Image: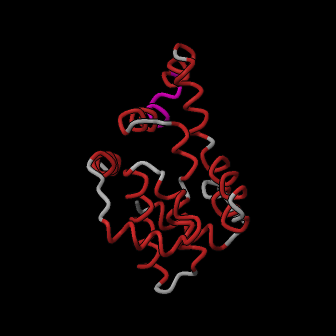
Amino acid sequence: MRRIGQFWRHASARVTSQESANAERILGPLAPLFLELPVNDQRHGLDVLETVIHLERQPSPLLQQAALLHDLGKAAAHFSVIERSVTVFLRAVSPKTLQALQRSRPAFARRYRIYADHAQMGADRLRSAGAAELATIVAEHHAPHPQSEDTRRLQRADGRN
């Protein structure tokens, strides 16, 4: 049921001009990276930010930026909401079917590799933008045992969204 709700939130995602302006204020010079994300990824980042604020009361600016940009690398995969949903479903239910799909569709396989490695790809983009500390959090946001306390806080919020 959680995944169905997640699919619906992504498929019907909207971002208000006020939310966008708030994200731009938090991100400063990194705002163009947020604005180039698909609307569903912007919505997810805003939802994670809201959860971070709820859990932490006064989160650091770095943690707020991480909430907004943690999935930055996913944009390069150019996966639709349907493709993402199918991928998540197959990864959980039938990894062999997902592997067969990748073998039969090389273009999908290339995009899937980007999607699967989105944490590192997003971190690389952030390092290139001069945000090394933020890049460290983004790089390890799917790690089972992250080094950074900020990453653990981000994981808690992301896991609720």
Above or below 58: residue 13: above
Residue 147: x percent and y percent? 73, 66
Residue 61: x percent and y percent? 57, 78
Above or below 132: residue 55: below
Q: Who's the residue at 53% across and 53% down the image?
A: 71
- How many badges with numbers are in the image? 0
Q: Who's the residue at 72% across and 58% down the image?
A: 127
Q: Residue furthest top?
A: 104
The magenta region covers 90-96
Q: Is residue 16 left or right of residue 30?
A: left
Q: Who's the residue at 52% across and 16% down the image?
A: 105
Observer-nearest of 24 and 148 = 24
Q: Who's the residue at 54% across and 70% down the image?
A: 27
Q: Is residue 65 left or right of residue 8?
A: right
Whether 95 is among the magenta residues is: yes
Residue 43: x percent and y percent? 37, 58
Residue 116: x percent and y percent? 59, 39
